[in-house]
Image (tube, rainbow, N blue to C red):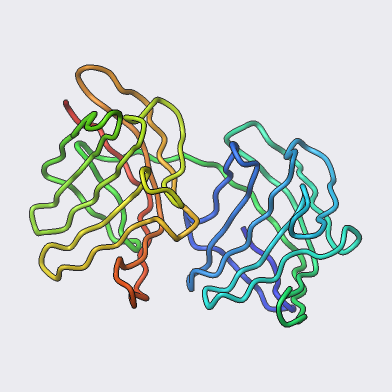
Amino acid sequence: MSAEIEGVPWQVQPYNAVYQAGTKTVVGFDGSFNSLSIATGDLSPGEYNLAKGNGSNNAIFSYITGKNFPSVEATDGKLKVLENDGTHIKGLFYFNGKSLITGGTLKITKGYFNITNWDWTGTDPMSAEIDGVPWQAITASYYGPISPSLANLRGSDGNGLIIGITSGSDFPVGVFDIYGSINDIGAVTNMTSGEIYNSTYMKLGQVKVLENDATHIKGLFYFNAKENVAVGTKKIRITKGYFNILK
């Protein structure tokens, strides 16, 4: 995903632009965790107006500092979906954003996205990239269901770095979000430094469960995470996540 923000080129990080079919949303994060999101009631190929931020078709550019610029009028923005087959979506867009607090404006032009989700694999029992650096678990375990359907996957690299994923519904086959929920969460724990990061407030994260039976569970994941302390500002990206864990 890319665009120009007030004429300045803007580009998302690798594997930080996703198509969320369930919510009919395209969202991307740049290197500073600023985000651009487009949501519509229908992402079938065609052309759509991007209306006010609370409309069925809308877009918003959000700075990590908390400044938000939603699309404001139906005539001020367009989305053109060129291709969409459920896992791949391609299109063009532009819109004028306006702060509902200050009245300040932001012009987004030359918007483009060409997103294919879930196009990676990994190494057993669990692997991922943390801020672009390969991470490999030497042990990984499945815990669950706990009560009544809460379940957890956890992998450790043997050096104190642990990635955990929690599902409130025992990892059903399919795709589910792992942000904004108290039950569906991605987390990274550094046992050496004591730092804990979780996905709850970072607006980007999903798990795709490919297989789940009596013997094993297999799937893919990605998420952004924030340091889990009251004044925490540190953030990390987990991309190309993979698990294939024996039960």
- Above or below residue 117? Residue 186 is below
Residue drawn at the location 21% of the way across and 68% of the way down: 195
Drawn side of residue 140 relative to residue 170, left or right:
left
From the top left corner, tell me how far across and down residue 119 is, in percent.
Answer: 46, 39
Q: Nearer the viewer, residue 164 or 100?
A: 100
Drawn side of residue 64 relative to residue 86, left or right:
left
Residue at the outermost left position: 158
Q: Quadrant of residue 150?
A: top left
Residue drawn at the location 65% of the way across and 71% of the way down: 68
Q: Quadrant of residue 165?
A: top left
Q: Quadrant of residue 109?
A: bottom right
From the top left corner, tell me how far across and down residue 84 is, in percent.
Answer: 68, 36
Residue at the outermost right position: 75
Q: Quadrant of the N terminus?
A: bottom right
Residue drawn at the location 37% of the way across and 48% of the way down: 182
Q: Nearer the viewer, residue 141 or 133?
A: 141
- Above or below residue 6? Residue 192 is above
From the top left corner, tell me how far across and down residue 15 is, in percent.
Answer: 47, 53
Q: Quadrant of the C terminus?
A: top left
Total numbered labels placed on residues in the image:
0
From the top left corner, tell me how far across and down residue 77 is, in percent.
Answer: 83, 60
Q: Nearer the viewer, residue 147 or 244?
A: 147
- Above or below residue 235? Residue 238 is above
Drawn side of residue 190 relative to residue 212, left or right:
left
Residue at the outermost top position: 214
